[in-house]
Image (cartoon, rainbow, N blue to C red):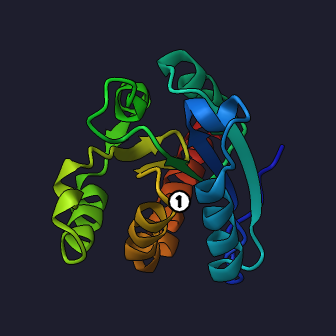
Amino acid sequence: SPFILLDSCMAYVVGVLTVSDRCSAGQQEDKSGEALENMVKEKFTESVVHRKLVPDEVEDIQQVLLAWCDQGVHLILTTGGTGFAPRDVTPEATKPLLDKECPGIVVAMISASLQITPMAMLSRPAAGIRKQTLIVNLPGSVKGSTENFQSIIPALPHALSLISQASDKDQHKLTK
């Protein structure tokens, strides 16, 4: 299992899922996934990062999200598929899997982005919790994905700690 206990060194297991027809077909380099992996490793130095590429297909996206959640990944960052184009289906793939939505994370990201570009209002991210995993949809561009991720970093350690505590309490109930 990729589970690492949360502690003061902020060792998280993070999944970075790039949703892109072109990247998954090998026609384009996955620069956003790489940039996010580098940011995670820089901000949370003890973290383990898993990366995958899938096309813009609901079933392919959900298959990876479900597998990573079942494996106890703490944080999943998706990049791509949050816009207005017909093939942008990442939020539609994510939302049905969530136990709880996290609208504050979405508001924080869009608010921060709107300070930079009015085009932020064309982003449709979802964020929420499934089991003990926080899932956050980010834009597909390097600039958009890293700026959005940067905007939520201050709250992530506390959020992941709370999710972990909830998981611990559930485990404790099961063992009584």
The image quarter containing residue 151 is: bottom left
Q: Look at 60% across and 64% down and name the residue there.
A: 36
Q: Does 57 sit left or right of 138 as displayed?
A: right
Q: Against 96, is 20 above or below?
A: below
Q: Does 85 sit left or right of 134 as displayed?
A: left
Query: What is the x, y in percent for residue 52?
Result: 71, 40
- One can see residue 65 in this view: no
Is residue 67 or residue 131 the one in the foreground?
67
Q: Quadrant of the N terminus?
A: top right
Is residue 143 or residue 111 the one in the foreground?
143
Q: Residue furthest front?
A: 27
Q: Does 53 sit left or right of 61 as displayed?
A: right
How many numbered discs sit on the rendered protein? 1
- One can see residue 7 in this view: yes
Query: What is the x, y in percent for residue 16?
Result: 63, 51
Q: Quadrant of the C terminus?
A: top right
The image quarter containing residue 5 is: bottom right
Q: Look at 57% across and 29% down and name the residue there.
A: 21
Amino acid type, label 1? Gln
Q: Against 131, is 86 above or below?
A: above
Under tag 1, what secondary structure? helix
Query: What is the x, y in percent for residue 61?
Result: 55, 27
Q: Residue furthest top?
A: 59
Query: What is the x, y in percent for residue 163?
Result: 49, 56
Please name the residue that numbered disc 1 is placed on: 165
Q: Against 82, is 114 above or below?
A: below
Q: Look at 19% across and 77% down and name the residue there.
A: 115
Q: Look at 60% across and 34% down and name the residue there.
A: 22
Q: Residues within 10 Å of mark 1 (few under 14, many from 20)?
A: some
